[in-house]
Image (spheres, helix red, strand yellow):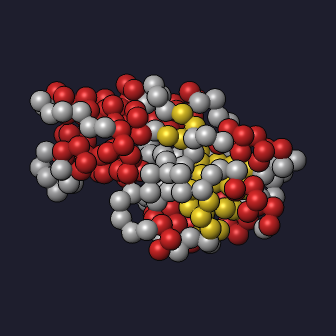
């Protein structure tokens, strides 16, 4: 049966809690340089921001620093070694995915994370998404709508039939730009900026099972 609707999830901080393994990679570099490890709770707000955010919290380094490219590659190399050690689905997420399948609602992943990392974690978690779109799947990263629009092509659905769930302002911006209903995952990393209520999402949910109620009302 072909799904008539779909739910697309951001990955880090929405579908899966990847912060422990990201923190481990950051801390490997910090210890190597004589710095104390960071607590996972301190890394968590930056975990949806990719290497840019993680190197900022880990070393106070921004992309305009001359050493940034080298440190970024070192970080990515360390992360590739530990990316599925402690990463887990968020509580209730496995049950949500099962419920979506039972209702013939397709689900997929749209993330700024590179495919070489995402596909390995997806396999390690035993997931079977209908589509996976990553940061290197199109020439643009979120908040550009291109990744989300590519997902609609893969699913053969219009954007209006898709819901995008994420934990970052960029997810809301990308979802709106693509013409999708946007949902904030309030259990996620959420960054350290403006309150999530100011992001302009269509809905905010506190637990994954609340999504089923939203879909039932749609």
Image quadrant in which the C terminus is located: bottom right
Closer to the camera in the image, 139 or 83: 83
In the displayed structure, 121 sits above or below 9; it is above
Quarter of the figure with residue 28 = top left
Q: Would residue 212 be visible to someone looking at this image?
A: yes
Q: Residue furthest right?
A: 1
Residue 142 in picture, x, y percent from top left? 46, 60
Count of marks placed on residues: 0
Residue at screen point 19% across, 28% down: 31
Q: Is residue 212 left or right of residue 121?
A: right
Please name the residue shown 23% across and 43% down the image: 58
In this view of the protein, which residue sits in the foreground, 22 or 185?
A: 185
Q: Residue at (26%, 37%) from the top-left corner?
A: 38
- The percent position of residue 164, horizontal first and vertical second, equals 61, 60
99 versus 25 height, above or below: below
* Residue drawn at 64 percent across, 34 percent down: 127
Where residue 100 sits: x, y (%)?
A: 77, 47
* Direction from residue 16 to residue 114 in the image, left or right: left
x, y (%) of residue 216?
A: 81, 61
The answer to whether residue 116 is visible is no
Front position in the image: 121 or 157: 121
């Amino acid at each position: 049966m072909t799904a008539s609707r779909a739910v697309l999830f951001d990955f880090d901080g929405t579908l899966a809690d990847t912060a422990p393994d990201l923190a481990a990679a950051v801390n490997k570099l910090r210890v190597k340089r004589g710095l104390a490890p960071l607590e996972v709770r301190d890394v968590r707000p930056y975990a949806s921001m990719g290497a840019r955010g993680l190197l900022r919290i880990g070393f106070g380094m921004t992309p305009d620093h001359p050493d940034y490219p080298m440190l970024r590659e070192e970080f990515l190399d360390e992360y590739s070694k530990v990316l599925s050690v402690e990463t887990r689905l968020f509580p209730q997420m496995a049950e949500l995915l099962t419920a979506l399948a039972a209702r013939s609602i397709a689900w997929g992943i749209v993330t700024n994370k590179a495919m070489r990392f995402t596909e390995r974690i997806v396999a390690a978690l035993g997931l079977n998404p209908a589509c996976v779109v990553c940061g290197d799947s199109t020439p643009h990263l979120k908040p550009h709508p291109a990744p989300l629009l590519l997902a609609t092509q893969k699913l053969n659905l219009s954007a209006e039939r898709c819901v995008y769930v994420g934990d970052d302002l960029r997810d809301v911006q990308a979802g709106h730009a693509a013409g999708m209903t946007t949902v904030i995952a309030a259990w996620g990393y959420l960054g350290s900026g403006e309150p999530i209520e100011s992001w302009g999402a269509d809905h905010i949910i506190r637990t994954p099972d609340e999504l089923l109620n939203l879909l039932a009302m749609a």
